[in-house]
Image (cartoon, rainbow, N blue to C red):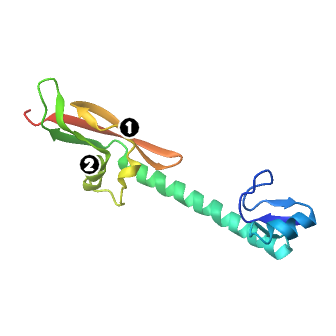
């Protein structure tokens, strides 16, 4: 019996896959538990349309991320902070602060601080390449220069 999986089923397949199983397994376990439905021609068309929409949506998301990355390329953020003798900051520069600075730089989208992939807060004066992940396949590096307030 052919069925279409609604969810990922271990050792059988992933959501949207059309698989052949024994009729009893389908009737007594998969279908009653909401894990699958019968692979009728109408259901197959519906799954194919959903798959096409998902591919188009993924392509649209990727292109939007590339457009946003173009706005962030070559961006240099200069931040002034109080620092001690050896260039150690009193406090630190966090991913939230970097996201705020990028937002204030005049971009046309909302940048979530979780997109700024800073391993740990910046605690020293210097220049840093900070990755900003806009999509699973699109990461852009923004230069953050930390200078002393004293000059």
Q: In this rendering, is residue 15 above or below 73?
A: below
* Outermost residue to the front: 28
Q: Is residue 26 left or right of residue 121?
A: right
Discs 1, 2 touching: Cβ within 8 Å: no
Judged left or right of residue 5, residue 104 is: left
Q: Is residue 113 above or below residue 21?
A: above
Mark 1 lies on a secondary structure that is loop
Residue found 75% across the figure and 72% down from its top: 46
Give how far across and how far down residue 16 sits, in percent: 74, 62
Q: Is residue 92 visible?
A: yes
Q: What residue sits right under mark 1 in the picture?
A: 119
- Point out the image quarter for the C terminus: top left
- Nearer to us in this view, 39 or 11: 11
Q: CA distance from mark 1 to mark 2?
A: 14 Å
At 80% from the left edge and 70% from the top edge, which residue is drawn? Answer: 31
Residue 55 coordinates in the image, percent (x, y): 64, 60
Residue at image coords 28%, 46%: 98
The structure residue drawn at horizontal position 34% and vertical position 37%, both measured from the top left corner, is 120
- Disc 1 or 2, which lies upstream in sequence? 2
- Would you name the residue on which mark 2 appears? 97
Between 44 and 91, the one nearer to me in the picture:
91
Q: Is residue 1 visible?
A: no
Label ID, residue 63: none
Q: Nearer the viewer, residue 53 or 85?
A: 85
Using a 10 Å C-alpha cutoff, classify the residue at mark 1 as few (fewer than 14 neighbours), some (14 to 19) or many (20 or more): few
- SS at circle 2: helix
| Residue 28 location (% of width, % of height) | 86, 69
Left or right of residue 2: residue 61: left
Whether residue 8 sits left or right of residue 138 in the image: it is: right
- Image spot of residue 45 (x, y percent): 78, 71
Where does the N terminus fall, quadrant-wise? bottom right
């Amino acid at each position: 019996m052919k069925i279409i999986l609604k969810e990922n089923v271990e050792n059988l397949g992933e959501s949207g896959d059309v698989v052949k199983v024994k009729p009893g397994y389908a009737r007594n376990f998969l279908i009653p538990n909401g894990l699958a439905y019968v692979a009728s021609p109408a259901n197959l068309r519906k799954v194919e349309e959903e798959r096409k929409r998902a591919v188009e949506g993924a392509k649209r998301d990727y292109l939007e991320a590339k457009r946003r990355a173009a706005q962030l390329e070559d961006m240099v953020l200069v931040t002034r902070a109080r620092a001690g003798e050896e260039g150690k900051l009193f406090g630190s520069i966090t991913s939230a602060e970097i996201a705020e600075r990028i937002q204030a730089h005049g971009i046309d989208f909302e940048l979530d601080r979780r997109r700024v992939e800073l391993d740990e807060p910046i605690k020293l004066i210097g220049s840093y390449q900070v990755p900003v992940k806009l999509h699973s396949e699109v990461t852009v590096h923004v230069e953050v220069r930390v200078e002393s307030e004293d000059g």
